[in-house]
Image: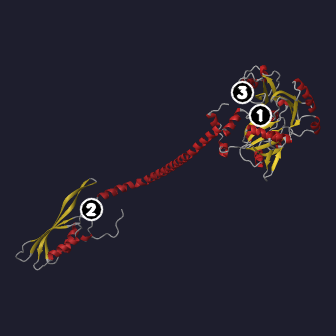
Amino acid sequence: MRYLFVSPEKISQDQYRHGPIFRFAGMLLLFGLLLQIPLICSCILGWKQLQDRVVEQSVLRTELGELQKADNPLRETRQKLAQIRQWEPILYNRIPISSLLNAVQISIPHNAVLDSVSIEAEQFDHLPVRGGTYRVPRDYRLVLQGLEKPGGGEALQAFCDALQKRLPTGSELMRSERLEQRSDGNVPFLLQYSVKPSGNYFGLGLKKIAEPDNL
Amino acid sequence: MGYSIIRYLRNFPVRYYLKGGLAQMHGPTISLFFSAQQSAALICRGRRAQGFELEVTNLAGAPPVNGVDSGFAPPSRSFSQKLLARSRTRGVPRFIFVPDLTSSDLYCNVHSVTNLREVNVESLLESLREDPRQVFGSWDESRKFRWEVFDSQLEGVQGAFERRLQEVIIVGIPADYCDQLETWTDTQQGTTLAIVPLSLACLKWFCTSIPTGRKTAFFVLMRPHAVLLVAIQNQKIILFREYTEDVEFAYNEIPLLAAELHSEEFETYVWSAQPLAQDVAINFPGTELTGEVLKQINGQAVVIRKSDGAKLELNSPVPHLLLWLENNIV
């Protein structure tokens, strides 16, 4: 008497609910759907992250546009700065000769007299600057010739030490000769230095400018 | 009944499964008996009666009773929820309807196979669905009916008619009433297990439960609007008669029918949903199928365990019939 006078649709509905085969199929389907949940969640999270990145990118793009807009007026200044920076190694490697002479002057002892001071630039680098190249020396040869008065003792040595202290870092004494004593008792000498430009010339007697100029 | 994966997926009962139906092996069954005068509901779970309610058609959202205009009352799910709650049962209900249909709403007759043009049950059902006049000439009903064919022991038959099968019983009830019941079941979010007319349910119970042996048995089904008289020989139904006259007329017919059937010995059984009137019970012979008789036939009374632990024994015909039907169908 089961399903007596019941329409086929309702019979199938009851079978779908209570039939063991359909229940098993339903269980498998629901279990399969349950397994999809982590995948769907990760897809949703990934999509959300992508959306966030797209929004972030558009914000950054807008900021970039604004910065580029703000950067346009500074381009000329930056070019000028770049040109100035090109001069940096040139200025760095140029020893102020007057200060070098000043160092020699304040280092020489009383019982020694200089005959000649010779300064020569050597070993040039060619640095490109706007409009051509600039020759920058890597080494300066300082040759000092003079006389040591009689009874001077260690005057020459004191002179060498004092001068060495004032010269830029890396400078070396290449040659130190004491010639034969002359008839008047003076002893001629010759000193040759290799002066290396180091950029720091305060030892030569230069003074720092208190407030640098604003560009 | 053809099933397919696509149809299954289209009608996938996801809500039912997610509500716990997937793991629920034995859902509750509500067997509903209703006639114009009486109604009752038996709530069972796992072949055990959990509750019995009378006059359920008075509850809100009750199922439609055939031939009774209940006015406009929107069906609500609270009807079955209320019944389940009262019997301390939960789950998605399955319904068995036992309506007491009037003569005009129930076609039930015994037909000789030799008189039928159709050679198998399927073609017979097809002819009945197309036009019942193809099978029995005098049919003036304009409504659509749903049809079922049984053998003389009320067992369902299929395929070609066998020679040994001399008679078939054709039963039909209005399709629109079945649709109403199915629609109502949908509002309760349940499923329909069967719509068994009271006459058919009683007869099937009688044929199954009462061994009449070689004697002729007359089964008298007392209904408010008519009396159904059925002759049974060798556990087979051989005759249907319905009397709209009084009970006395039907009883007077029994000896005449017995003589026609050449049955010197016969027994009469009476089934009535309500207790028989005293004059009928005294004046007319026969065994009234109620009380202790039913308890002996079915082996035990219908036992309902109340919430306080007390047992309630029911021996009236309706709960016995509904429990038997529930056990047979589920």
Element at badge 3? Answer: loop
Quadrant of the image containing the N terminus of chain A: top right
The one nearer the camera, B92 or A173, is B92
Q: Quadrant of residue B27?
A: top right
What kind of residue is marked 2? Leu
Q: How is the image coloured?
A: secondary structure
The residue labelled by disc 3 is B158
> Is A160 rendered above or below residue B240?
below
Q: Please name the residue that numbered disc 1 is placed on.
A: B178
Residue A157 located left or right of residue A40: left
Q: Under tag 1, what secondary structure?
A: helix
Separation of marks 2 and 3 at Cα, in angstroms: 115 Å
Q: CA distance from mark 2 to mark 1?
A: 109 Å
- Asked whether the viewer can see residue B222, the reply is no
Chain for disc number 1:
B
In which image quadrant can residue B237 be found?
Answer: top right
Structural crowding at the residue carrying mark 3, measured as other residues with C-alpha within 10 Å and reported as few (<14), some (14–19) or many (≥20): few
Whether label 3 touches label 1, CB < 8 Å: no
Q: Which residue has dot 2 on it? A: A91
Residue, x 36% and y 56% (percent of image)?
A78
Percent across and percent down for residue B243 are 89, 29
The residue lying toward the viewer, choosing from B123 and B326, is B326
Horizontal and vertical percent position of residue B82: 77, 47
Q: Position of residue B56 (x, y in %)?
A: 82, 43
Viewer-side label of 2, 3: 3
Which residue type carries mark 1?
A: Cys
Which disc, if any, is residue A210?
Answer: none
- CA gap, disc 3 and disc 1: 22 Å
Q: How many marks?
A: 3
- Counting residues from the N terminus, which is met first, the one under dot 3 or under dot 1? 3
On what subunit does the disc labeled 2 rest? A
